[in-house]
Amino acid sequence: MFDYTAQLERVIADIVARCDMLSHVDARRLVVFARRGRTGTSGPLASCHSVNLPPSEPGYYYWWDLDTGRWTRRSPWFVTRSPRVCRAGRPVAYLLSFSLPRFCDQRPSASKIARYGTCEPWLAKLDTIVHELSHIDPSHRGLRLVADDRDRPGSRLHTRGFFARVAEAVHAYLASGPDPELLDFLRHDFTALRARFGGVVATTFRSYPSFPQAYRDPLRPQPKGPSLAVVPLTTPRRVRFTEMDLVQREFLPDRTRRIGSGRPSRTRAA
């Protein structure tokens, strides 16, 4: 069967090696994985997730009564932390997720057609890959914030300038003469790939459909706070991950199944 995320990793390594605009990206510190995303529904085609942010400042949540305006309860004091993700002993800074089969079946949006003049589906997919790589900050501290369209200090992830730079990077990469066979899979939709290879598999986390995300860690001991009822925080079971937490799943049109588990997952997502 065709390993979609493995091929995406090869393309990403080739892009960052050939494109000066993305030379700050260390492909060895990325994990590429798949999420469920049905074709024809709204939702992300792909996402860049930062797992390298320092702990936040301490704080707490609170709730209030809309009628009286008074606080009614609060959470414990906590800091927000990034999970620790390592692969082959090397810390991972970013996770890139791709929604299957939605990513495979994407059609060029009007904005992409406008940026490229004309845009075939495979080019729209390449644009999406470069888009997510462009969110990686050169300082490797979180997602890259860019100046807005009025050149005010960086505070946004997307601007017209950002989309223009993505297109510039795509053109630069294609002008470098990448191997057409490396990109050939982008020319096929999900159905065609399954027909050609007998199935599509991808890397996911063992805890599918969940994956490593920032979490709230209660402070110990707790500082003094408002004298209100305290609502406990829900904390994840796992905050440390290695390559042992990565597994393969076969992605089907309406579900997924763990390779070797013999039982399909009925998890469905938009």
Image: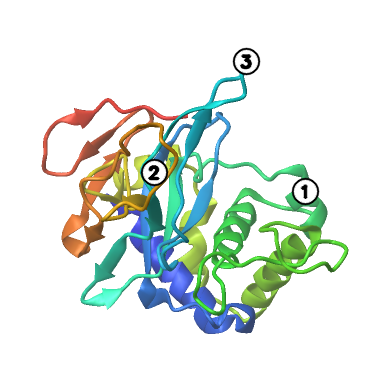
Circle 2 residues within 10 Å: few <14, some 14–19, many ≥20: many
Q: Name the image quarter holding residue 125.
A: bottom right
Q: Which callout, 3 or 2, points to the residue nearer the camera?
A: 3
Gap in angstroms between the C-alphas marked 1 and 2: 25 Å
Circle 1 residues within 10 Å: few <14, some 14–19, many ≥20: few
Q: Which residue is mark 3?
A: 67
Q: Nearer the viewer, residue 5 or 238?
A: 238
Disc 3 residue type (three-letter): Asp
Q: Secondary structure at mark 2?
A: strand
Q: Which residue is mark 2?
A: 35
Q: Secondary structure at mark 3?
A: loop
**Mark 1 / mark 3, whichever is N-terminal:** 3
Residue at figure coordinates x 82%, y 52% from the top left: 114
**Residue 217 higher or lower than 141, as above or below:** above
Q: Nearer the viewer, residue 33 or 199?
A: 33
**Mark 1 / mark 2, whichever is N-terminal:** 2
Q: Position of residue 214 (x, y in %)?
A: 39, 53
Residue 226 visible in the snapshot: yes
Q: Position of residue 132 (x, y in %)?
A: 56, 60
Q: Which residue is mark 1?
A: 111
Disc 2 residue type (three-letter): Arg
Disc 1 residue type (three-letter): Ser
